[in-house]
Amino acid sequence: MRRTLFGPEHPKTLNSLTDLASNYRCQKRWGEAQQLHLQVIQSAEKGLGEKHPDYLRYVESLSITFQHAGQWSEAEELEIYLLQMKQHIFGEKGLLTLESMANLAIIYRRQGRRLEAEKLQLRVRSARQRVLGKWHEHTLDSAVSLGVLLSDKGLHDKAREIFEETLQIRKSVLGEMHTDTLRSHGHLAALYWEKGQLVKAESLQRDLVTLQEEHLGRKHPRTLESSMALAGIHWDQGRRVEAAVRLHRAIKARKELFGHEDPSTARMGTLLCYWLRQDDWLENIVTTMSQISSSTT
């Protein structure tokens, strides 16, 4: 409709097509999403030119789709192009330049290129801190990304300092129930879990699940993801029945949301089967307790 009204190169047409591509991305229809993104980019290049902010935004959308699809080489190529363009247009310390630098660091991390990722994240964090201030959300995002990289390298104490500081700042600035604050809870809990400090990990993860249940609802995907992590901590603590029941309930809820073919749900199902094989009696207990829970809700 908009293409007919405004023409194929009008911003409203391009924005509508980009929104449609994003919907395809959410549905994991990678090929269709990428074709639409390319169509938008070609039209924007003709109508707006390579240096227009909207053109760069459309290229960024394609990069995000590549990342979601796990096509890291393609995403890296686009992000390097975007970084070079933004450095030329906005300067080394421009906010949009730093955004692309941070995105490139994430791509490097996912490729296993941790040293390159860490160097970029340090540059981004330092620049954002000078330009935006220590408490700005973009600065905190950079700090969290750096903390994740340090944790990957086994530098848990340095990562913990960053995660704890970020959590406290977000609580003060955004409030306890804000999505980013909850995300910081999860990072800190995961770090303690990785270090084997299960009591601290369990306490933080339980608080996170409780907050998400209140704020997002019991069957929200993020709540279920956190609940599955809590099940993993319980299993490592030797609380096998509690762990298996919690994981079983989360898997059942995810199947209702995403269907039986969802890859993440399938992986969790495989893990649950492995757990149940550890003890002959565990499967019967889990099934019975889940049936009781279902009948009372």
Image (tube, rainbow, N blue to C red):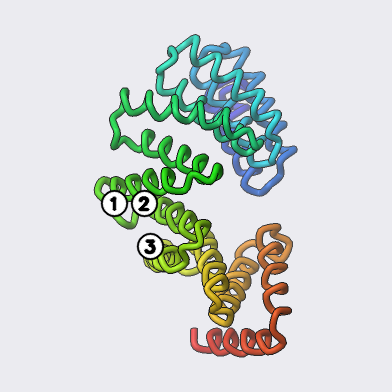
Residue 1 shows in this picture = no
- The answer to which of 122 and 153 lies nearer the viewer is 153
> Which SS class for mark 1?
helix
Question: Rounded to the nearest whole Å, what is the CA distance between mark 1 and mark 3?
Answer: 15 Å
Numbered circle sitting on residue 215: 3
> Is 190 drawn above or below residue 65 in the view shown?
below
Label 3 close to label 2 by CB (< 8 Å) = no
> Which SS class for mark 2?
helix
Camera-nearest label, 1 or 3: 1
Amino acid identity at mark 3 = His
Instruction: Return the x and y of residue 165 as percentages of the image width and height.
Output: 32, 46
Q: Which residue is mark 1?
A: 171
> Is 76 drawn above or below residue 33 in the view shown?
above
> Is 55 drawn above or below residue 246 in the view shown?
above
Q: Which residue is mark 2?
A: 181
Which of the two discs, 1 and 3, labels the residue nearer the N terminus? 1
Q: What residue is drawn where x is 57% and y is 11%?
A: 49
Label 1 close to label 2 by CB (< 8 Å) = yes
Q: What residue is drawn where x is 54% and y is 14%?
A: 85
